[in-house]
Amino acid sequence: MIGTSIKRQIMGIAVCLIILMAAVSIMSMYMVNRGEQELQKLTEEYVPSYGNLARANVYSLERGIALRNMIIDKLQFPSDAERFAHHRKMFDDRGAAFEKEVQSARGHISTLLQNSQTIENSVALTRVQNQIDSAVDDQRQLLNREIARLLSLLETADTRTAADSLSRIDELREALTVKLDGIRSSMMALVNEGGEDNVKNQQDVMIIVAILTVLAALLGFVFSIMVSGEVTRPVQRLLAGTRNVEAGNLNDLVEVTSRNEIGDLTAAFNRMIEQLRLKERIRETFGKYIDPRVVAGLIDKSELAVADGERRIMTVLFCDMKGFTQASQQMTPQGLVKVMNRYLSIMSEPIHDRHGIIDKYIGDAIMAYWGPPFTDSADHARFGCQAALDMINRVSVLRAELPDLLGVRNVPVQFDMRIGIATGEVLVGSIGSRFMMSYTVMGDTVNLASRLEGLNKIYNTHLLVSEATMSAAGDVEAREIDRVMVAGQTTPQSIFEIMAPKGELSSAQLSLRENYAEGLAAYRKRNWDDAARKFAAALDASPADGPSMTLLKRVKQLAAEPPADNWNGVWQIDEK
């Protein structure tokens, strides 16, 4: 049945069972009909013929009684002709009835002989028929002649001879009765045999029906096992394959073992696995060029691929390596690629670990963002700041690995990290042309993050963030650096430096932050002397602090050349 469809297999089983049921029904009908015929023979032929013979025997006895009454009437009432005539009429009637019953019995036996289906039954019926002929034709004729002789003797009043004749008649009647009893016994044996045959026939019907029913059940069971096994085994393999796919295992195909609908389904399942493999290779391949979550979103969520963008509040990060451009000029192309790949790997891990999306690599710069649908609105600023702190902490790791990457122990290369983070409204979506699209973010917030990264050069800092980022970050230690108007922006921005995670500032950093804040307040009030003194105190706490040195230098310039009267403490930054 391997090459047969399941529908045909089931139909084949149904047809086989129907044929077996029909065979059982036909056999049962045949056997029942045969039993009915045998029972009909018993009721219409055997039993009536036996009854005819029994009544014939009774009529023979009654005829004998009537004969004795006639003799008594002749001897005791010779002159009572009416009495004698009454018994004579009874004698004649019983004789006629005897003959009638015997003829009826013969008629039934003749019918049975005509319809007999076995030799044994025909022989037995012929034997009965011969016994009837012998009793009626021979014994009955002798008896009738002796009775006629007796009646003539009664007319002559020869009583002595009549008595002898009567004894002879009794002997003949007794012999006839014995023969009739034998005939009835033979008929009873045939009746019993017919009844036993009918019972046996019914038993045979029951046995045959039971055998055919068991055979049908066994065949149905065998066919069901064959079909169910052919169906369930491939289905179980399909189920195991489905579970493998569910577990992410796309390496194993399901063996096609049948050429029915299950086989077609298995082949389709294998084709589906091939498509999933292809899609997974696409995910893996493009996941190295685009963030895997963006790839998954573009494949699984069609709304990410639509051309129309959306405005969302997101956090954008730009980072760059300070001093890397000069260092790269001293490296071979192979060494440069090794350093770049290692640098980007080390700096990308914190972004990935903090649920960020890497938008692009621009040389040694990295652009990343956080926000819906990849990050909850309440977390994206915090994740961005935590990732930035982790990135800064990994600079020392990259410095330690650089000699091994280049194969040179003494490498005169110094570099550091600059990061800018801004939070605000951006345009996010699939942006590009009909030739190429990119799922990215655009807008003033993106530009601000880029400008903040560049401001690290001016303030000699590592991590500057916007005021919105600072407000949403929550669990970090920070200080306000300045209030500036960056290139491309029309609104002044307060910028902050993330110093450390929450609660991890040293005493020197605490002193630095306090003095710097007081110096910034005096600077905005144009109190140049106090501002200079506080920035100097901040440098005492942290001699290498870039913002303190920058503001101290600026205060000295402003003290020498005071700004206009409408100056509000905002510093104009023209460089990008």
Image (cartoon, rainbow, N blue to C red):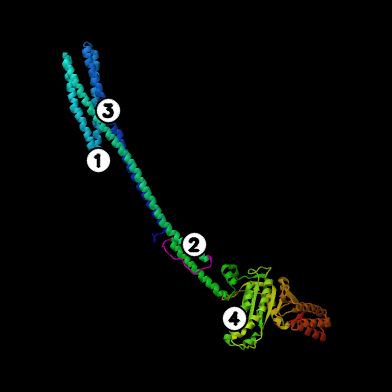
Magenta extent: 246-260
Question: Where is mark 4, residue-wise?
Answer: 341
* Contact (Cβ within 8 Å) of mark 2 with mark 4: no
The numbered dot on residue 54 is 3
Q: Amino acid at mark 2?
A: Leu
Q: First in sequence, mark 1 or 3: give its number.
A: 3
Q: First in sequence, mark 2 or 3: give its number.
A: 3
* Contact (Cβ within 8 Å) of mark 1 with mark 3: no
Q: Which image quarter holds the N terminus?
A: bottom left
Q: Amino acid at mark 3?
A: Ala
Question: Where is mark 2, residue-wise?
Answer: 239
Q: First in sequence, mark 1 or 2: give its number.
A: 1
Q: Amino acid at mark 4?
A: Asn
**308 sits to left or right of 85:** right
Q: Nearer the viewer, residue 379 or 542?
A: 542
Question: Where is mark 1, residue-wise?
Answer: 118
Q: Would residue 82 be visible to someone looking at this image?
A: yes
Residue at x-position 48% and y-position 68%: 252
Mark 3–mark 4 Cα distance, whole angstroms, equals 125 Å
Q: Secondary structure at mark 2?
A: helix
| Residue 325, horizontal then vertical, whole percent | 64, 86
Mark 1–mark 3 Cα distance, whole angstroms, equals 26 Å
